[in-house]
Amino acid sequence: MNSLEQRILKDGIVLDSDILKVDSFLNHQVDVKLLKAMGSEFLELFSDKKDEINKILTIEASGIAIAAFVAEAFNVPMVFAKKGEHKNVGNDVYTADVYSFTKGRTYEIAVSKKYINKVDKILVIDDFLANGQAVLGLKSLIEQGGAEMVGAGIAIEKAFQPGRQKLKEAGIDLRALAVIESMSPETGVKFGTN
Ligand code: G4P
């Protein structure tokens, strides 16, 4: 069992069969020692592709802290897509619309054209995989820049939600540190494998 799975069992709170709260260590208060370990574990998870990956791409807000440690482990730059208003990035941007099922609304994500280039082989990192829309939006940004998406590294994949299937259908090499097969407040979290 890796450090994230151990921590989920210790401090994760299953709100209902769909939502896991991890805000005491991952997406509000952040345990940087845990994130450093996760960076190394992502490097291990994608060790077969580590020599080709030259950039990490994530999306604000919760992806940023994790992606920073992954980038440090791979020794490559990290870029994060901005959500909503992005005037400070300028107009020379790639954009994609992302629909959030959890929030019931569409938002735009954007990244400056300067930071996605044809030579790039990009690993996408995010905290949760639920419906897969954020990762598909990031894939679109990568393709607009003529770069290659090498895979998606997810901290917590909720395998019982549609995201896994959607990413596989899109041909994405999906790997997660913690794959949750099912969960409930009564029985807790049950992990599966990639
Ligand atoms: P998708 O990207 O996979 O399609 O998922 P969805 O739109 O349904 O998720 C919307 C937001 O909810 C995302 O954060 C996602 O990280 C978060 N989320 C999804 N499932 C869970 C869960 O079980 N627990 C927690 N704590 N969060 C979950 P976001 O809106 O992009 O927020 P942030 O990154 O700015 O914090």
Image: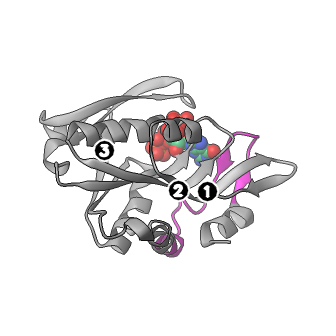
Q: Are marks 2 and 1 in contact (CB under 8 Å)?
A: yes
The CA distance from mark 1 to mark 3 is 26 Å
Callout 3 amino acid: Ala
Which of discs 3 and 2 lies nearer the camera? The answer is 2
Viewer can see residue 159: yes
Secondary structure found at label 1 = loop
Q: Is residue 9 above or below residue 20?
A: below
Which residue is outermost to the right? 186
| Image quadrant containing the N terminus | bottom right
Q: Quadrant of residue 11?
A: bottom right
Viewer can see residue 27: no
Q: Quadrant of residue 162?
A: top right
Q: Residues within 10 Å of mark 1 (few under 14, many from 20)?
A: few
Callout 2 amino acid: Arg
Secondary structure found at label 2 = strand
Callout 1 amino acid: Asn
Does residue 23 belong to the magenta stretch?
Answer: yes
Instruction: Name the N-terminal-most of marks 1 and 3.
Output: 3
Q: Which residue is mark 3?
A: 81
Q: Quadrant of residue 143?
A: top left
Q: Residues within 10 Å of mark 2 (few under 14, many from 20)?
A: many
Out of 24 and 157, give the one closest to the viewer: 157
Q: Which residue is mark 2?
A: 175
53 relative position to 24: left or right: left
Out of 26 and 187, give the one closest to the viewer: 187
Q: Is residue 164 above or below residue 106?
A: below
Q: Which residue does the image show at 52% across and 41% down from the upper left?
A: 168
Which residue is outermost to the top? 105
Q: Which residue does the image show at 50% across and 67% down from the upper left?
A: 45
